[in-house]
Structures are given as C-alpha cells and as structure tokens.
Image (spheres, coloured by chain):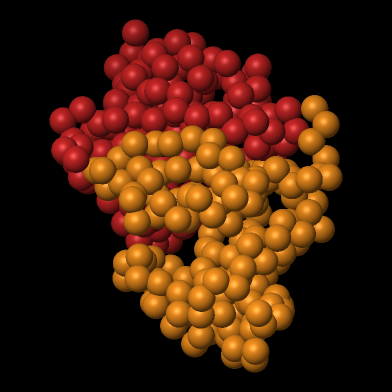
Chain colours: A red, B orange
Amino acid sequence: MPQLDIRVTNADDAPRIRAITNAVGVFNTEEIDTVDELLGDYFSQGAAKSGYHFLSCHSDGEIVGFACFGPRALTRGAYDLFWIVADPTVGRQGIGGALLARVAQEVRSQGGRLVIAETSGRPDYASTRAFYLKYGYEAACTIADFYTPGDDLVIFVYRVPGSNTIR
Amino acid sequence: MPQLDIRVTNADDAPRIRAITNAVGVFNTEEIDTVDELLGDYFSQGAAKSGYHFLSCHSDGEIVGFACFGPRALTRGAYDLFWIVADPTVGRQGIGGALLARVAQEVRSQGGRLVIAETSGRPDYASTRAFYLKYGYEAACTIADFYTPGDDLVIFVYRVPGSNTIR
C-alpha cells in the first residue's frame, strides 16, 4: 500500500481537488461551487484570516484526497469539518482516516476541543456516516427534512482527546 | 399597551440596534461585533445578496427590538435565526413573540420550511430557551461544551406551518 503524506494545501492542488470533488458523484453543483469559494478565500486571504484550513493527501506523487476545516465563530474551541473527500477511483488506502486523524491533530494544536461534521441522513450517505462512527465521532443530533423534505441533517461530534474540557 | 410595528430595517435603525444589543447584558464583545458585521453586509449588499434579513420592531416611534435571519447555504428551505433581541428596558410588550411571528411569515413567503435557532444551555439563557419553546420551537439537539467547557449549544427548530414538508 502506498504511503500517504498529508500536507497543507497549496495553489497547485486546486485542479485535483476540484476533480476529486466532481468524481465522488454525490455532490450537486452548488456544493461543488462551495469548495471553489472556500479554496478561493483560503488562497487569497490565507488560512487564519479566511477561517478555512485545507489539507491535501498525497500518494505516489498524486493528490488523492483533501479536507477543509476551521474554527466556529463565537465559540472557544469548536471547529467545523466542512469537507473531507477521498478520490473514489484510487481504492481503499485509508485516505479518509488519515485525513481525519490529521484534522484532529491540527485542531488540538490550535487549542480546539470539538470537531463538528454535518452530513446527510440519505441512504447514499450511509458510508459517510459509518466512516465518522468508525473514527470516534458521535451522532449527536438529527434534524429531519433539513436539506430538503426527506433529506435529514445528522450532526457528528468528535471530542479531541487530551483537549481541555474541564467544566 | 403600545402597538408594535415590524418593518424591514433601514440604515437609520443601526444605532438603536447596537444600543439594544449592548443593553441586553448577556452578549460579549465578539458577539456584539458580529451584529455590526451582519448589519454592514446587509446595508452594503442588500438582504438577498448578503443572506442577512433584518427586521426592526417599532413602538411609539422608537425601535424596541430586532431580528436577523437568512437562508442556510446548501439547503432548500432551512433558515437560520441569527439574532432576536428585545430592548430589556421597555418591559414586556410581546416584542420577541411579534418578531418571531414575523420571521416565520417572511420565511414562509420565501419558500422556507424550517427555522433554526442556536442558543446557549447556560443558566442565564434559561429565559431565551423558554421563549423559543413558548412559540412552538422544539429543542432538537444539545452539544455539550460547544461554546466553551460548561457552555452547551442547544439547537431549536421551528417547522413553518403550511410549508411543503411532503416527503
């Protein structure tokens, strides 16, 4: 199995990030446009100012996945995981798990305590929901018919081990 | 009891909106600055482009409360209620209830189905949580320690009567 190498995203990565997002097949045009918007803010303003942190996963010299996360305004230590995508054409190399682990590490290093991942309750997102559960995320909440009638929101929460959660 | 009159917010209302937000006493500086940012986007870009809709509640020629809401990206019909504030110095005139009713009406007229209100689980927000329950919002979800350790997120959901929720 090839070695995975996760690095901060740079501008050269953008075409592959777009291509991978398109290739997944579950995202609609509006969602794919959102990735472009966040990338645009990240490249023009930087991670700290834009609030969007991008990580690229490399394997054998090619980008095979990416993640985007950032701090939630008005909280002390809650982070949103906006996007996590693995190239569907490259087979099971543990790309998603490696990206999730690196996101947790980055969030902890920035003083974060929680990672929030919002996803859909639709049947075609079953593998996504199983993925979060596998890596220690908890399904905290479902809001029925949130995205559209019949398409629920499921909010997953990850509590960063070792972060300060003393009450 | 004076008549309440709810109108779309205009630029003249900004100083009173800031003063009321300050007067409430539960919001920190970062939160108060957020109101200013949203107002700035609303005045410079308009409601549709900024995604922030502001309503002002007038009573006897004075602004006594405001609300700010807008559509949630990547959904068809979910709206966020970002702010709803009544002047704490004017007594109980039903300002909050009148604003909530008008928000529901506006959301429905824009094709919305759900209104999401996020608030704190802290003891000093007990009256806010009771307010949402009184007006038909449901407490859908709690995420412990979301804002800070010891300060939970509570998500309230209002389902707009008569909106299309056929699955």
| Residue occupying the point 65% across, 37% down | A146
User: Which quarter of the figure is the N terminus of chain B placed in?
Assistant: bottom right
| Residue occupying the point 44% across, 28% down | A140
Judge by depth and name the residue closer to the eye, B39 or B153: B153
Side of A126 where A51 appears, left or right: left
Picture quadrant where residue B153 is located: top left
Task: Tell me if residue B53 can be seen.
Answer: no
Judge by depth and name the residue closer to the eye, B14 or B137: B137
Judge by depth and name the residue closer to the eye, A71 or B90: B90
Figure check: B116 above or below B5: above
Side of A31 where B83 appears, left or right: left
| Residue occupying the point 50% across, 43% down | B155
| Residue occupying the point 61% across, 45% down | B137
Picture quadrant where residue A89 is located: top right
Counting from the top left corner in percent of width and height, residue A53 is at 36, 46
Extreme residue in the top direction:
A1
Counting from the top left corner in percent of width and height, residue A127 is at 54, 15
Counting from the top left corner in percent of width and height, residue A10 is at 37, 46
Side of B38 where B47 appears, left or right: right
Extreme residue in the front direction:
B1
Task: Tell me if residue B119 can be seen.
Answer: yes
Figure check: A89 above or below B127: above
User: Which quarter of the figure is the C terminus of chain B placed in?
Assistant: top right
Q: How many marks?
A: 0
Counting from the top left corner in percent of width and height, residue A38 is at 50, 50
